[in-house]
Image (tube, helix red, strand yellow):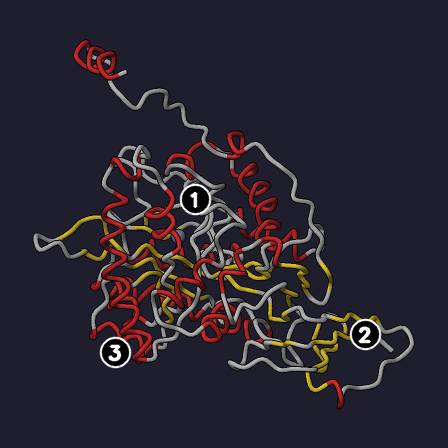
Amino acid sequence: MTKRTLIRCDRLFTGLEDEIRRDHTIIVEEGFFTYVGPASNAPAQAPGDTVIDAGERFVMPGLVDAHTHLVFGNARSEEDIDFWGTPEFRALRGLFFAQRVLAAGYTSIVVPGDAGNCSISVRDSINAGLFDGPRIAASSNVIANRHSLNDWFPEHVGTPDYVTGRLCTTRDAQIEEVRRQAKAGVDCIKIAMDGTHFRENGTHIAAFTQEEISGMVTEAHRLGKKIVVHAYGKEAVLYAARAGVDIINHAFFADDECIEAMLKSGSHVSPTLTFLRNNVDFCPSWEPTATSGYQGAQRRIIEVAKKTLNRMREAGVPFMAGSDSGFAVTPYGEWHAREIEILVDWIGFTPAQALRIATAGTAKAMPRGQLLGAIEAGRRADFLLVDGDPLADVRVLQQREAIDAVYLDGRLMSFKQRPYDAYKVSHFNSLKWTDVYSRERVAEIRATT
Ligand SMILES: [Zn+2]
């Protein structure tokens, strides 16, 4: 007989319904839930069984983040992301931070855009049993086009192999890149649908035509890979939805035509507003994010996004939860669950609905996702014991000390919160001045200090 673990739960949230179940028993065997039901009907305890009494702790499925960039290293700039760390260093750093993410209660993450083989290597080393870490849906470089996101640098730089973007400016190159990534072993493919150019009236111009995005989606799906896009603009969202992409990140400027197309294609929306909210809430006035006008723009975008995303919720568009972790403003393991708070506060979901989105809902983005995200017989035994009641206040999931135990495949994970040197992890740029010290400027500074 196989070794079993029995967990007695006073408060069980399965991820498949809004209510909690009381006085239930969960049985885990060989990494899977084999029984989830009333304690009174549970198979009898046998010699050799391990018994855990969850007591008053809230038992729930492991959380899933649809948007964690393992390769970014808590970056302070695009140059930090792309130029300074070797691919080998970025992969090792990604592995370290993946464990931080797991410790925060996130047992699965989707990496929507990466560089080279970094997240693929981290995933493979975890799956091979070399290290503990979350389940990872890995990706490779973001497919970019002229003037799209991830084609940040001047034409004479382009997108060398080690940067996150990969310029694919013809249909043949786009299909070839989809096939290259599939061969490399990605689980999902990221496309930068938004351009960085705008029309006179301020609307975004999509970076790919309908024909281009449809071609990539058809080929990716033929090869069994999911497609994730970054799309704020209406045109980008519409093309992506019509093409049948799996996940649309952001979708802030979508209109009713987009919503209709998303309902038809079954595309999910992952708002990923945590990144914007953190920028607005946390960054003081002297940060470049504030002085450049970026923070102000994000504040305005949030107001539009709230309206759009409420309409999507009312229309029945399926949601996922992602945080855009990996930037200096969204460091790993810190703010993932803030997206759940945003789903409740800004988009109008109940706490139970938001929790279901952040578990079973977002698990659909993972490979074999139907086996993840919920506490149900036949699924993988990824679950948490939480001190507190997330249904009363979802913010409890953001408290490190409230995540009392994290089980992956029925195994209790243990973590040492090793301190590290943030300045050796990223921020390699050689910026020394943010001002220009002309005679006038020096006099001005001297007069005011
Ligand atoms: Zn992102």
Q: Please report contact status of discs 3 and 2: CB closer than 8 Å, yes or no.
A: no
Q: Are marks 2 and 1 in contact (CB under 8 Å)?
A: no
- The amino acid type, in three-letter code, at marker 1 is Phe
Distance between mark 3 and mark 2 Cα atoms: 47 Å
Residue at (91% x, 76% y) in the render: 47
Tell me the tag on residue 130: none
Residue picked out by circle 2: 4
Which of the two discs, 3 and 1, labels the residue nearer the N terminus? 3
Q: CA distance from mark 2 to mark 1?
A: 41 Å
Label 3 vs 2, first from the N-terminus: 2
Identity, as a three-letter code, of the amino acid under mark 3: Glu
Instruction: Please provide percent x and percent y for residue 378.
Output: 66, 80
Q: Quadrant of residue 84?
A: top left
- Name the residue tied to disc 3: 260
Residue 208, x across and y down, in percent: 25, 58
Q: Nearer the viewer, mark 3 or mark 2?
A: 2
Q: Secondary structure at mark 3?
A: helix
Nearer mark to the viewer, of 3 and 1: 1
Residue at (21%, 74%) from the top-left corner? 256
Q: What amino acid is found at the position of numbered circle 2 in the picture?
A: Arg
